[in-house]
Amino acid sequence: MSDDFDIVSVRLIPDKKLLSDEPITRPQDAIKVIAEEYKYFDREVFGVLGLNTKNKPINFTIVSIGSLAASIVHPREVFKYGILSNASRLILFHNHPSGDPRPSEEDLRLTKNLEKAGDLLKIEILDHIIIGSDQERIYSLKAEKEFALDDYIERENKRDEMVRKILRNRELGEEVEL
């Protein structure tokens, strides 16, 4: 067995230019930039748009191509491109081939986890936009935050509190009433 190992390097290699030099100020601005990338996918595709400090697009990459109803997304893959391109902010995208852009519980959970990771890395998640059957049917978690994400976070906090109570009472040998 050899003790040799490979020396590797990671680099971003430009592919094609995005069609915008304007700052992203609304979900519709972001959709204009990436619309062509999502036009023909029949499976869930998760992508990330990197922005500079002035909210101008600096790169877009597809992080994951999944199945008809799911895509595996890991924070490491999401933030790798942001770090390598010196993005200060990210906008997350994925499509729902079903045509319904409303977020699933898993979409909300993923967004919450990516926001936490972004806080640690000091790379802000500006939005998570879900694209429906065409670029006209979108769901912006930022625009709808007061309904979707806050309710989800409240449910998660209540669930976590209940789990802590159950574990605490188990340690004490007491029964828990739910």
Image: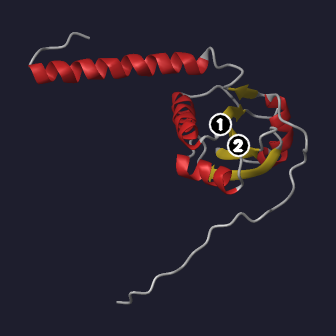
Q: Name which quarter of the figure residue 108 lies in.
A: top right
- Residues under labels 1 and 2: Cα distance? 7 Å
Task: Indicate the amino acid at tag 1.
Answer: Glu
Please say if 24 is above or below 13. Answer: above
The answer to whether residue 2 is visible is yes
Task: Indicate the amino acid at tag 2.
Answer: Ser
Q: Nearest the camera: 23 or 17?
A: 23
> What secondary structure is marked by label 2?
loop
Indicate the position of residue 44 as horizontal and vertical percent values.
64, 44
Tags 1 and 2 touching, CB below 8 Å? yes
Q: Earlier in the sequence, mark 1 or mark 2?
A: 2
Q: Relative to 128, is 164 on the left or the right?
A: left
Q: Nearest the camera: 54 or 35?
A: 54
Q: Which mark is residue 1?
A: none
> What secondary structure is marked by label 1?
strand
- In the image, what residue occupies the spot 71% across and 63% down? 12
Q: Relative to 112, is 56 on the left or the right?
A: right
Q: Relative to 39, is 123 on the left or the right?
A: left
**Residue farthest toward the left in the current orientation of the protein:** 173
Indicate the position of residue 42 as horizontal and vertical percent values.
70, 46
Q: Which residue is mark 1?
A: 124
- In the image, what residue occupies the spot 86% across and 50% down? 18
- In the image, what residue occupies the spot 75% across and 65% down? 13
Indicate the position of residue 73 as horizontal and vertical percent values.
55, 46
Q: Which residue is mark 2?
A: 88
Please say if 26 is above or below 148. Answer: below
